[in-house]
Image: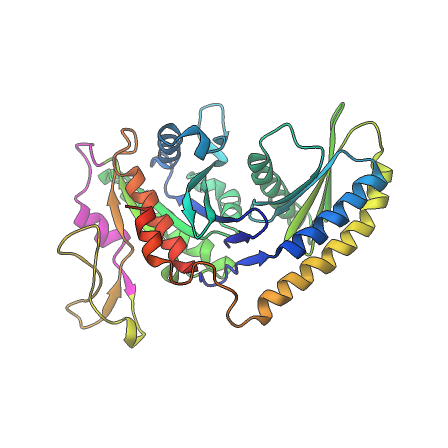
Amino acid sequence: MSMINYASREINCKIVYYGPGLGGKTTNLEHVYGRVQPNTRGKLISLATETERTLFFDFLPVDLGTIRGFKTRFHLYTVPGQVYYNASRKLILKGVDGIVYVADSQLERMEANLEAMQNLYDNMQEYGYDLTTMPFVVQYNKRDLPNAAPVTELQGALNPGWEVREPPKQRVTPDPYHAGENLIEQITSGEWVERAPYFEAVAVTGEGVFDTLKAVSKLVLKTLA
Amino acid sequence: MPVGAASWSFTEDDYGAILRSLQQFLYDSNARSALLVDRSGQLVATVGEPPQFDPTAFATLTAADFSANDQLARLIGETEFNSLFHQGEQESMYLVDIARRVILVILFDNRTTLGLVRLKVKHAVEELTRLFAEMFQRGRDQANPPNILAGAEDEIDRLFQ
């Protein structure tokens, strides 16, 4: 739930990075922290175990610019990816405005990816949030690894699309980030489907990190416009 | 608007009323400062001595602390822990729920006591609950809440070029 503070002229929004354990969620935040100007970001807070696994969450506030005289402030959170931390993971989703799902591209992590995606849908549903109607982007991380699955395979498994029932939305909508691909289209069965925008990334080098962040932030602001 | 994630906003008048209520409480209780944090971890207001720490990080951790304790309450068969107390050697914190949407955090030291803080906070909680209930009701009553970003699509696009 975005909060508009007229007194300090700020728009505050919450973005959560979700995904399987060791997929690179914290690395995304660390890269953002390292690259943005110190005066436009706050402290990076990490509630982690002694082996640097996220225990509760990581948190980073960043300012992404001013619109109509209002400072746009994004609060970035990660959740613990490990399966048994579901109770804490769910708490972080409270009041979320946008979701980045960080998938681990490695073939052998496919099952963990699927499990985390299902868990995301389940937890969102428990709050009454509908992932298909809110800002949601998918990031395929670790694209540099030799055992990375092809993007088409990952898309088919993790981002196959959801049905678009409302006739006004049933029109081909090109994917602004991938030429020749569509976000909304009619598939061979005649059904209209919408997919979340996706990005390829190598979070350790920063590749794709800002593209992902910019895309989700833009979607969040557009829900207010 | 994301389904289920209702936005809310408050005006300068609301903000003024919140500040007055908290200032009166600080005066009555002799506590150092009071912070209002919404349940999703965003700082709403700070009153009293300016905090010597990062208030944004503080707000996030406060919301997480409260949420985690809410779940602990459920595990032991309570619906919630309406207030929390963290005691330090010099500084202590008292956290109390407002209208199930906001958390009031009071920072105090040995110039006052937990008893006095708890006694005086009751009135502030009542007043703030009324103010926030009005704010949320106003949000619900407005079919189309004032939209400061209406028509700002181009500006948003430019921001992310």
Q: Which residue is pictured at 67% across the width and 56% down the height?
A: B14
Report the front residue among A120 and A63. Answer: A63
- Could you tell me residue A183's position as x and y percent? 23, 59
Quadrant showing the N terminus of chain B: bottom left
Q: Position of residue A23 (x, y in %)?
A: 33, 37
Whether residue B86 is visible: no
* Visible residue check, residue B142: yes
Q: Is residue B120 left or right of residue A190?
A: right
- Residue A150 sits inside the magenta stretch: yes
Asked if residue B88 lies left or right of residue A35, the reply is right
At 36% from the left and 34% from the top, the residue drawn is A22
Task: Count up the numbered dots.
Answer: 0
Name above or below for residue B86 compared with residue B103: above
Q: Is residue A93 magenta?
A: no
Viewer-proximal residue among A174 and A190: A174
Left/right placement of residue B127 relative to residue A90 reads right
Indicate the position of residue B10 as horizontal and vertical percent values.
60, 56
Q: Could you say which quadrant of the image residue A192 lies in?
A: bottom left
Q: In the image, is B69 to the left or to the right of A182?
A: right
- In the current view of this chain or complex, which residue is farthest to the left? A180
* Residue A74 location, quadrant: top left
**Which percent across, then down, holds residue A155?**
22, 51
Bounds of the magenta segment: A143-162
Q: Which residue is depicted at the point 51% across and 45% down?
A: A92
**Colour pattern of the rendering:** rainbow
Q: Against A215, is B93 above or below?
A: above
Q: Residue furthest front?
A: A69
Question: Residue lying farthest bottom?
Answer: A167
